[in-house]
Image (cartoon, grey):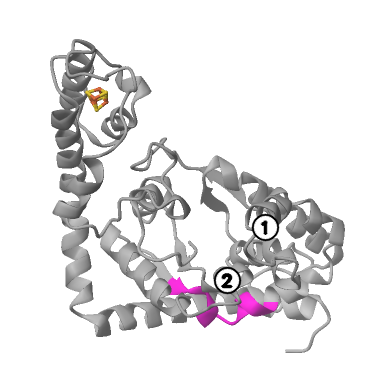
Amino acid sequence: MRPTGKLHLGNYMGALHNWVRLQHEYECYFFVADLHALTSDYADTSQVKQNTLDVALDFLAAGLDPEQCTVFVQSHVKPHFELPQLLAMITPLGWLERVPTYKEQQENLTTKDLSTYGFLGYPLMMASDILLYQADFVPVGQDQVVHVEFTREVARRFNQFYKAEGSGPRAQGAEILPEPQVLLTPSPKLPGTDGRKMSKSYGNTILLSDPEEVLRQKIRPMVTDPARIRRKDPGDPDKCPVGDLHKVFSSQETLAKVYDGCKTAGIGCIECKGWAADAIVTLLAPIQERRAKYEQNPALVREILHEGDRRARARAEQTMQEVRPAMGLTE
Ligand code: SF4
């Protein structure tokens, strides 16, 4: 995950929430992608360090358990610099130019000059993030599938050129970089406080670390079904962003009350928003409790990240010890 600052409910429901479950099912590596931030924010890197720490704190607060998975910072594991460079040797330029997000981002982020070598090579960095761990699966939402497909193509090309020399765990002549599979994770539709998709760039987020009062203040003025102009007008939760929040966070019982009360004008929107806030406060309570515990003990967070860096480095280095000789480089 990119270090964009404190994480919001959209980050949680779209990824983190699934990761917390997956850490018990697979050997998992999760990292704060500080190098990714540099590809677009190179002109002002003043926030990268703090944002990296904030995301790491939110990882731990959300329930990533360093006993169950490896949590680390991308730039602390030097093979993340090395493998993209080696993969660059075999990647046709056209493959990079065709990645849909390349053109899209260049057009959308008009305030930044993204005509850089680093930004063009960004998909190779993402491919390396996966291939360094010889990963079987990558947990992503539908919008990231294209990047995993790109990774598969790069791995295939690498494997066509190079085979294991037998210097690592793989037998001589074996493929070194397995083609990863997508592990599609559910990411429910989550509106921000203005009804658009929750996103930091829209300024419509509810943070995992927002205190209860702030959270309620954000939800209170939320847009609702435009058909409910007066209290006595019936509405439809399916046409209301607050209804969408209920679908994600409320119990079946509350959801039934919302549908019934909204469609019969039996409840007011203020009351309904209060219930949505209640459900989110309940969800966030243990997350905020853990965050406070880690915030009070920065030495522990540093120790967890150092240990994560160490484990990730050892695993990534294992791959590099097969990659380097296969490409003709001496160890
Ligand atoms: Fe939306 Fe609830 Fe108001 Fe219905 S009652 S329009 S679901 S806020």
In depth, the one of 227 and 251 nearer the eye is 227
Image quadrant in which you'd find residue 111: bottom right
**Whole-percent x, y for residue 268 in the image:** 15, 23
Q: Give residue 300's position: percent from left, percent from top.
A: 25, 81
Quarter assignment of residue 325: bottom right
Number of residue marks:
2
Q: CA distance from mark 2 to mark 1?
A: 32 Å
Residue at mark 1? 178
Quadrant of the snapshot with the C terminus: bottom right
Q: What crowding class fits label 2: few (fewer than 14 Cα within 10 Å), some (14-19), or many (20 or more)? A: some
Residue visible at 17% across and 56% down?
286
Residue at the bottom extreme, as displayed: 331
- Residue 165 visible in rendering: no
Report the residue marked by disc 2: 41
Foreground label between 2 and 1: 2
Q: What residue type is disc 2 on?
A: Asp
The answer to whether residue 208 is magenta is no
Residue 35: mark = none
Which is nearer the eye, 165 or 60? 60
Residue 319 image offset from top left, x and y in percent: 64, 73
Q: Give the residues drawn in magenta, as a range.
A: 72-82
Label 2 sits on a secondary structure element that is helix
Depicted 216 relative to depicted 66: above or below: above
What is the three-letter code of the residue carrying label 1? Pro
As drawn, 41 above or below 61:
below
Looking at marks 2 and 1 on the same chain, the residue that comes earlier in the sequence is marked by: 2
